[in-house]
């Protein structure tokens, strides 16, 4: 069977970005996946110019992120190849037509199940790509003095829940993990303790992992572009887990997701290990924590956030 690399090399590959619902659009068969939110996908920056036969893209919600991804995707498709972008109306869908026209595309637009679907043939001449690519690329954010990228969680500011957890975090020790590490802000605070010996930074967003790799150069750290819920990721016998757990999956609120993170932390810790967690006040973590940990302590709550320390 041809690998994704072979398919791209052979100039025959159909590209897919994200997971559009099949009831909204027919998905191309045997497509190469390019979303940074799907571990193992090919990088959208990697195919050469005009190498893909087509691209179907569930366009991301943020304007900078979306224009960056569409610019890369258009560049990768051969002139004349089919380009399709779709998005929910309230997450960028209504802007797609104009944004693609600004890239020099002549588009058709349809609506289905609260989505806009915009199609065009990739024009030979593309316009405005450089600006979109520059605005959406990984960059050093001045206020943070850290590398980040539009589209990554809280990409240009410290999340208040993260800041609150950092304020309450004790000096940790031994082997640990950061579940959903983002660009590494919480992890940098953890690594201030010389007693931390090994630290796994895990995130489902490849862009976050790439930024974290630039923000943290520390031999104690290993970076994993992975889904924390994936049982194939080996995480056992840890002394500590820290997390500002996500509660969105594919743009939708998913109350189950942080609970799965808590379950995974309980599995990964040895008896006596500790989990430090920042939680949005409206989310129900407590019952699942109490069912999996011996001692659960609410350390503080303010401004919509709660900080917990849970001992296994
Ligand atoms: C609330 S943010 C916290 C980021 C960072 N730790 C901080 O405090 O700034 C949650 C992070 O979890 C990541 N994430 C979401 N779902 C995930 C999953 N299933 N597995 C791993 N990471 C995930 C997101 O990409 C995001 O970076």
Image: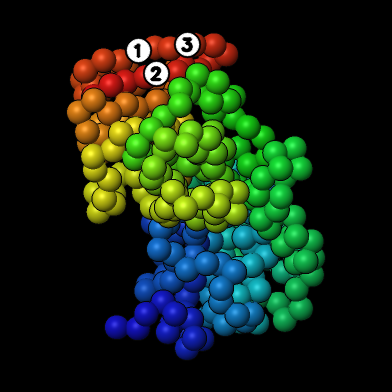
Q: Residue at x 60, y 49 (%)?
A: 215
Q: Secondary structure at mark 3?
A: strand
Mark 3: give few (<14), some (14-19) or many (20+) Cα within 10 Å. some
Residue designated by label 2: 308
Task: Say whether disc 2 or disc 1 marks the residue closer to the N-terminus.
Answer: 1
Residue 278, quarter of the rendered image: top left
Please state if 308 lies on the left or on the right of 145 as rendered: left
Residue 132, x across and y down, in percent: 74, 60
* Residue 112 shown left or right of residue 277 in the figure: right
Q: Position of residue 229 (x, y in %)?
A: 30, 44
Q: Which mark is residue 297?
A: 1
Apparent side of residue 121 relative to residue 263 in the rendered image (left or right): right
| Residue 47 screen position, x and y as percent | 56, 76
Dot 2 surroundings within 10 Å: few (below 14), some, or many (20 or more)?
many
Position of the N terminus, as image quadrant, is bottom left
Q: Which mark is residue 300?
A: 3
Q: Residue at 66% x, 74% y: name it.
A: 75
In front here: 290 or 86? 290
The residue lying at 40 percent from left, 25 percent from top is 276
Q: How far apart in space, not on screen, are marks 2 and 1 (Cα)?
A: 6 Å
- Pointers 2 and 1 in contact (C-beta within 8 Å): yes
108 to 208, vertically: above or below: below
Disc 2 residue: CB within 8 Å of ligand 1: no
Q: Which quarter of the figure is the C terminus placed in?
A: top left
Which label sits on residue 184?
none
């Amino acid at each position: 069977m041809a690998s994704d690399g072979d398919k791209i090399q052979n100039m025959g590959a159909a590209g897919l970005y994200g997971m559009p619902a099949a009831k909204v659009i027919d998905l191309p068969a045997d497509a190469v996946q390019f979303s940074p939110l799907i571990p193992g996908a090919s990088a959208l920056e990697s195919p050469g110019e005009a190498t893909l036969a087509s691209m179907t893209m569930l366009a991301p919600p943020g304007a900078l992120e979306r224009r960056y991804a569409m610019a890369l995707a258009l560049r990768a498709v051969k002139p004349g190849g089919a380009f399709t972008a779709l998005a929910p109306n309230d997450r960028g869908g209504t802007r797609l037509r104009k944004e693609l026209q600004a890239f020099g595309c002549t588009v058709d637009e349809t609506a289905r199940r609260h989505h806009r679907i915009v199609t065009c043939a990739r024009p030979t001449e593309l316009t405005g790509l450089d600006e979109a690519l520059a605005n959406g690329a990984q960059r050093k954010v001045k206020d943070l003095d850290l590398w980040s990228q539009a589209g990554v969680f809280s990409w240009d500011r410290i999340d208040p829940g993260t800041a609150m957890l950092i304020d309450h975090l004790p000096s940790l020790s031994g082997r640990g993990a950061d579940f959903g590490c983002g660009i590494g802000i919480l992890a940098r605070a953890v690594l201030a303790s010389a007693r931390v010996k090994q630290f796994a930074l895990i995130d489902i967003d490849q862009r976050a992992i790439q930024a974290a790799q630039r923000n943290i150069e520390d031999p104690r750290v290993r970076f994993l572009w992975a889904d924390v819920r994936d049982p194939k990721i080996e995480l056992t016998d840890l002394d500590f887990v820290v997390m500002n757990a996500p509660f969105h999956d594919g743009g939708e609120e998913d109350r189950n997701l942080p609970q799965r993170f808590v379950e995974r932390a309980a599995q990964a810790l040895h008896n006596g290990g500790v989990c430090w967690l920042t939680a949005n006040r409206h989310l129900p973590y407590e019952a699942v924590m109490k069912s999996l940990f011996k001692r659960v302590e609410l350390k503080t709550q303010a401004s919509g956030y709660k900080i917990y320390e849970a001992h296994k």
